[in-house]
Image (cartoon, rainbow, N blue to C red):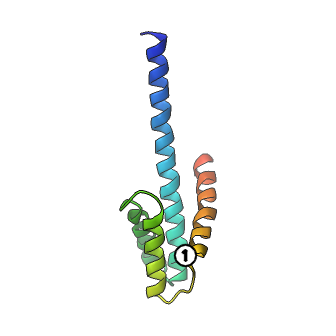
Amino acid sequence: MTTFNERERAFESKFIHDQDVQFRVFARRNHLLGLWAGEKLNKHGDDAAQYALSVVAADLAERGDDDVLQKVSADFKAGAVHLSDAEIRQKMDALLAEAKSQIASGK
């Protein structure tokens, strides 16, 4: 095998690894967001866990964060929780940093 082929495989492997890590970070962020939002919606135990999973699943609807934001925002409106989209987005950003830290530390 040539050095070029080895480098190409190394870059492909790194790309795949980076994509996997990014997916896990966003899934963790969405899970943490779901737990936070579930608490605001007075969900506890299994209900809170199921709600967190529904937030994670919402991210699969379309590319980007808008689908998650729309779900949580709609659920807050239906549950009479008064937080703006900007406040939810700010929480998403804070939880993204926390999720990166958790994934990096192997939690």
Q: Is residue 58 above or below residue 39?
A: above
Farthest residue in the bottom direction?
Answer: 80
Residue kind at label 1, given as amino acid type: Asp
Q: Residue at x 47, y 57 (%)?
A: 27
Q: Residue at x 48, y 62 (%)?
A: 65
Q: Nearer the viewer, residue 96 or 66?
A: 66
Residue 92 position within the rendered picture, expressed as x and y whole percent measured from the top left:
57, 66
Q: How many marks?
A: 1
Q: Nearer the viewer, residue 90 or 22?
A: 90
Q: Residue at x 49, y 82 (%)?
A: 76
Q: Is residue 30 above or below residue 38?
A: above
Q: Residue at x 43, y 16 (%)?
A: 5
Image check: 37 left or right of 57? right
Farthest residue in the left direction?
Answer: 61
Q: Nearer the viewer, residue 64 or 94?
A: 64
In the figure, residue 56 lies in which quadrant?
Answer: bottom left
Residue 94 position within the rendered picture, expressed as x and y whole percent measured from the top left:
64, 63
Q: Nearer the viewer, residue 105 or 1?
A: 1
Determine the secondary structure under disc 1.
helix
Image check: 25 left or right of 16? right
Image check: 79 left or right of 107? left
Q: Is residue 87 above or below residue 81?
A: above
Read off the residue under disc 1.
85
Q: Quadrant of the N terminus?
A: top left
Residue 50 position within the rendered picture, expressed as x and y whole percent measured from the top left:
41, 72
